[in-house]
Image: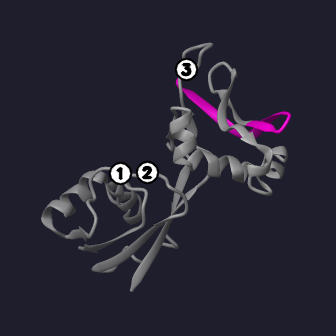
Amino acid sequence: MLENWVVMPTCLPLVRRRCHACTSGHFRANGKFRVNANHKLLDAWLLVLCTACGDTAKLTVLERMNVRSVRPGLLDRMHDNDPALAAELLQDPVVRRRNRIALDWDNAWRLDTGGSDHLDREVIDVSVRFAARIPVRPVRLIAEGCGLSRAEVERLITEGKLVSAVRLSGKLSADFTFTLKR
């Protein structure tokens, strides 16, 4: 029987970027936007606050865009300070590259295993699905989901009792499956 686990975000991730006021390295996005129109050209920013001093920084979302070329509804969502839009934009690689930022997902996600009825079986097949592109070490997910230590998971991989079509070392943010034989 195939188990289904889901990695779900619990809040917006922290933004890694150097603060100009206090040299802290983290900002928190609260879903607020600033939109500025100059005739037919539009600029829009996602506002982020320094976690140490509270200074505000702007992450460029739109720059000198013609108003007519902006997707319908996007402007309304920005004016409404839509937190879901903030989450979408933080995930967008173009926005991250343009603003030279990285995301810190520590303590911003949880693993939903659907219960613990799998812990007593000899062999479990698990499908792990990501609700958002959250980079997590598979060893950590498996350890948390199966109630094992990370060292125990590493030992099971070495012994060939934990197998997957994907490499279980490093970080993943895409769906994968694995089989655990006890």
Find the magenta span and give its range.
Answer: 24-43
Queried whether the magenta region covers residue 27, the answer comes back as yes
Q: Secondary structure at mark 3?
A: loop
The C terminus sits in image quarter: bottom left
Q: Visible in this render: residue 116?
A: no
Q: Amino acid at mark 1?
A: Lys
The residue labelled by disc 3 is 24
Task: Give the position of the N terminus as an image quadrant.
Answer: bottom left
Gap in Å between the C-alphas at discs 3 and 2?
23 Å
Disc 2 + disc 1, Cβ < 8 Å: yes
Q: Residue 157 versus residue 116: which sits nearer the camera?
A: 157
Residue 10 placed where, x, y %? Answer: 61, 53
Image quarter for residue 73?
bottom right
Q: Residue at x 57, y 37 (%)?
A: 14
Q: Secondary structure at mark 1?
A: loop
Number of labelled discs?
Answer: 3
Question: Percent from the top left, x then y, of residue 147?
Answer: 38, 61
Quick one: which residue is furthest to the bottom in this view? 1
Identify the residue position indicated by label 1 in the image.
Answer: 171
Which circle marks residue 135 in the picture?
2
User: Looking at the image, which residue is at 64% across and 49% down?
Assistant: 87
Q: Is residue 10 above or below residue 66?
A: below
Marks 2 and 1, the one that precedes in the sequence: 2
Q: Residue at x 27, y 69 (%)?
A: 164
**Direction from residue 126 to residue 100 in the image, left or right:** right
Callout 2 crowding tier (Cα within 10 Å): few <14, some 14–19, many ≥20: some
Instruction: Kindly indicate whether the residue at mark 2 contacts the one at mark 3 (C-beta within 8 angstroms).
Output: no
Q: Residue furthest top?
A: 21
Badge 3 or badge 2: first in the primary sequence: 3
Packing grade of label 3 (10 A; few <14, some 14-19, many >=20) is some
